Image (cartoon, rainbow, N blue to C red):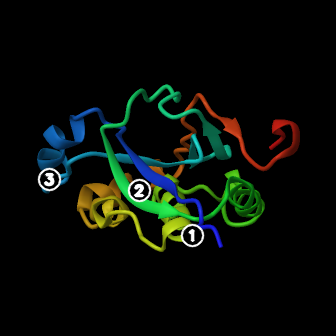
Amino acid sequence: MEPPNLYPVKLYVYDLSKGLARRLSPIMLGKQLEGIWHTSIVVHKDEFFFGSGGISSCPPVRTLLGPPDSVVDVGSTEVTEEIFLEYLSSLGESLFRGEAYNLFEHNCNTFSNEVAQFLTGRKIPSYITDLPSEVLSTPFGQALRPLLDSIQIQPPGGSSVGRPNGQS
């Protein structure tokens, strides 16, 4: 029997604040944040991410966010591209529909964590998944929550995954 093919799985990490969180968070929040993280999963030669438009994909580093600030090697997977795309289609019709997006509770990092666990059995780093609770644990974060809850983020530059003809 032939050994299974292994496909590398990477986590692309982008700081949406472009360094401002590191400089301003001590003043505004009373604690140090290293960044405001957006993540995506790169596997099978594409970058997959979640935003208010649902699950999207593009060739790696082709969103308008530019190159990632860091790349985390999540591991390898035996999951084929065909099975993975079926899985994403299922997620896009259930847990990760665009209208399910919430900046603090159901965002790109929630998606990346879910997909990383499906592909490799490993979670993404906790400094990324813990960020919303860190912000909300501060008085300023609580004061901003109503405004921040209304924000819908969809990184430009991707195409929809799992919807016929790109329909929402």
Task: Please name the residue shown 53% across and 59% down the image.
Answer: 6
The crowding category of the residue bearing disc 3, from other C-alpha atoms within 10 Å (few below 14, some 14 to 19, many at least 20), is some
Q: Quadrant of residue 138?
A: bottom left
Circles 1 and 2: CB distance less than 8 Å? Answer: no
The quadrant in which the N terminus is found is: bottom right
- Residue 32 tag number: 3
Residue 103 visible from this viewpoint: no
- Decide: few, some or many residues near mark 1? Use Cα within 10 Å; few <14, some 14-19, many ≥20: some
Amino acid at dot 3: Gln
Percent position (x, y) of residue 37?
36, 48
Residue located beneath label 2 in the image: 145
In the picture of the structure, the residue carrying the numbered disc 1 is: 118
Name above or below for residue 67 compared with residue 3.
above
Which residue type does callout 2 highlight? Arg
Task: Give the image location of residue 101, x and y in percent.
Answer: 60, 55
State the separation of the CA atoms marked 1 and 2: 31 Å
**Secondary element type, mark 1:** helix
Tell me: 161 left or right of 107.
right
Tell which tag, 3 or 2, sits nearer the viewer: 3
Which mark lies nearer to you, 1 or 2? 1
Could you tell me how far apart the alpha carbons at marks 1 and 3 are, in whole angstroms?
A: 32 Å
As drawn, the residue found furthest toward the right would be 164
Compared to residue 59, the image places residue 136 above or below, namely below
Specify the farthest residue to the front: 1
Label 2 secondary element: helix
